[in-house]
Image (cartoon, helix red, strand yellow):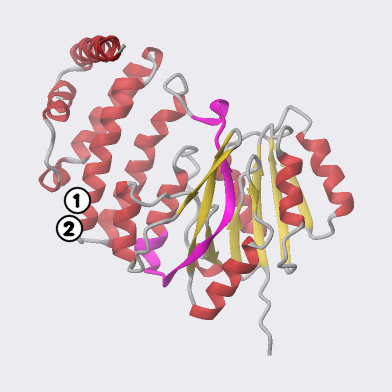
Amino acid sequence: MLIIPKVSIIIPVYNGEQFLERCLESVSSQTYKNIEIIIINDGSTDNTKNICELYLQKEPRARVIHKKNGGVSISRNIGLDLAIGEYIYFVDADDYVLQNGIERLVNKAIRNLADLVVAEYYVAYDTKKTKISPLNIKKSNDFLCSILSGKNHSALWNKLFSRRLFDEIKFPADVCYIEDKVLISQILMTYQPKIDFLNAPVYVYWQYEQSVTNSNDRRVMDILAAHINIESYLDEFTVDENIRTAFASSTYSCLWFILTTVDKQFLEEAVIIAKQHIEDMRKYRKYSALSPKVRFLLLSLKLPVGIAIPAIKTMRKGLDQLSSARRQARR
């Protein structure tokens, strides 16, 4: 008997009028037909609501939820609560799915009894598309190390999930940036799912200047919140030294990035959060070979906030001057 499981496709959107129609059309035109399409309009203030309502009139497999703005994690959780499919697939509203993407993912999952299928994808910028092939790592702990270290992308849209992986896990409501890294880390630690890889692209991830989080955006500090969430799961679910090493290296690199790039209006808040996080990270210190620059940063964070902030500002000024000198030297 031919098995045709339902796939729940969850699409959160906020002010997505520029690309939403392209995204929805790519989902409707999938060669795999047994899908439900759950669109969560997260309090958009542009024409997104009208686009969604028009889409409903021509797509009977779709449902739309209009809600107050609360962030992508809450939107996806609403989608998970509504989903009835045996598989879950997430799409971002400014990207699109290749026409046979869902079919290829489902076939791979069924054929190899996989709980999580990871596929190739394209990164697009202007007219250029580059195919990305994830590292084929099938053991859960090793795959988690690759996610924590950044060797494999934590993005959701190149992955098909078995519905059971969300029985006890949801997106962290307080994290709206790299929330996918938190979720996948929790899934891998909790369920140790069977992982398989699809050597074919299923998705086109568009990069736009306005869509990239920058240092002026307070969301960059969600990186700290994300690592705090992951740490709580590490303490509960694993003693694997490779995972702890990957986590420690990732955390210290992120601390450096945040405190040297976050806009100065958020620096004090970032320092206060980082100081607490560093205390919680003491038990991981032995797992990471700290560079001199990170050691200096950690020493600065040991100081009272009123002294730590000027020290970090001085360090940032020195880094800016060094970068400027290097740019001049290359001319």
Please state the extent of the stretch shown in magenta in the rendering: 187-212
For badge 1, the amino acid type reads Thr
Please check the rendered image and state whether residue 189 is part of the magenta-colored stretch, yes or no. Answer: yes
Task: For the C terminus, give its image quadrant.
Answer: top left
CA distance separating discs 2 and 1: 6 Å
Q: Which residue is mark 2?
A: 241
Q: Nearer the viewer, residue 192 or 290?
A: 290
Q: Is residue 162 visible?
A: yes
The answer to the question of whether label 2 and label 1 lie on touching residues, with beta carbons closer than 8 A, is: yes
Q: Is residue 84 visible?
A: no
**Mark 1 residue element:** helix
Q: Is residue 325 above or below residue 110?
A: above
Q: Position of residue 198 (x, y in %)?
A: 50, 66
Q: Nearer the viewer, residue 255 or 71?
A: 255
Residue at 43 percent across and 50 percent down: it is 154
Please check the rendered image and state whether residue 269 is part of the magenta-colored stretch, yes or no. Answer: no
